[in-house]
Image (cartoon, rainbow, N blue to C red):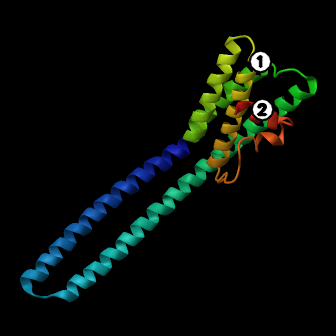
Amino acid sequence: MSQGRGRNVRSLILGLFGLVLLAGIAYFFVWLVGLAVTSGVGAAIVAASITALASVLSVTLSRRWELRKEIQQEHRQQKLPIYEEFMAFWFGRLSKGSESGGTVPEKEVEEFARRFHKKLILWGGDPVVKEYSQFLRLARSASSQGSADKAQQIALILGFEKVLLAVRADIGHANKGLAKGDLLSVFVTDIDKYITDSR
């Protein structure tokens, strides 16, 4: 946490420094143009100034891009273990539930959720948080009625796939060419029946 805050503060300071530097360069450039026009010294000074300005701008923008990439990489390193934990839990529970023919024990889900939600709020990408939140709403709605009907079961399973797609996108996958049910078919053997029923 302290490292993340330190990087954010450093990023803010560098950004402010860059703005002040650009403002100073712009002022200097305007002053040089005015000098060249009034004294007739001319185009050589203006050309040299433009070259220097372009060079400084290039270095500043390049450094900002590198800093942004570093921050993205650090966020990615924090996200990966959280998403791996999510996958390990749900894949384990779903396979255990299908073997026993039962559902996932509610107590296990609650214990996992307590740990996972804090991490997700801190490090999860916005689309992942949104899809996961939608999935939770569907699950709570079904749970409040005692048992989910067929339409709710289909909505739940497809909502879970949306979470998986958002996780994949957040760690850099394009998800191109993946149709509805492609991810679910990895662990739900009769997914095509659900997809047909959802249409």
Q: Is residue 27 left or right of residue 142?
A: left
- Name the residue beneath numbered marker 1: 106
Is residue 9 depicted above or below 63 in this figure? above
Label 2 vs 1, first from the N-terminus: 1
Residue 117 x %, y %: 63, 29
Q: Is residue 7 left or right of residue 14?
A: right
Quarter assignment of residue 70: bottom right
- Name the residue beneath numbered marker 2: 194
Residue found 64% across the figure and 53% down from its top? 172
Residue found 24% across the figure and 65% down from its top? 24
Mark 1 residue element: helix
Specify the quadrant that holds the N terminus: top right
Q: Is residue 49 left or right of residue 16?
A: left
Residue found 63% across the figure and 32% down from its top? 132
Quarter assignment of residue 192: top right
Residue 62 x %, y %: 45, 67
Depth check: give the residue in front, 148 or 59: 148
Q: Amino acid under label 2? A: Tyr
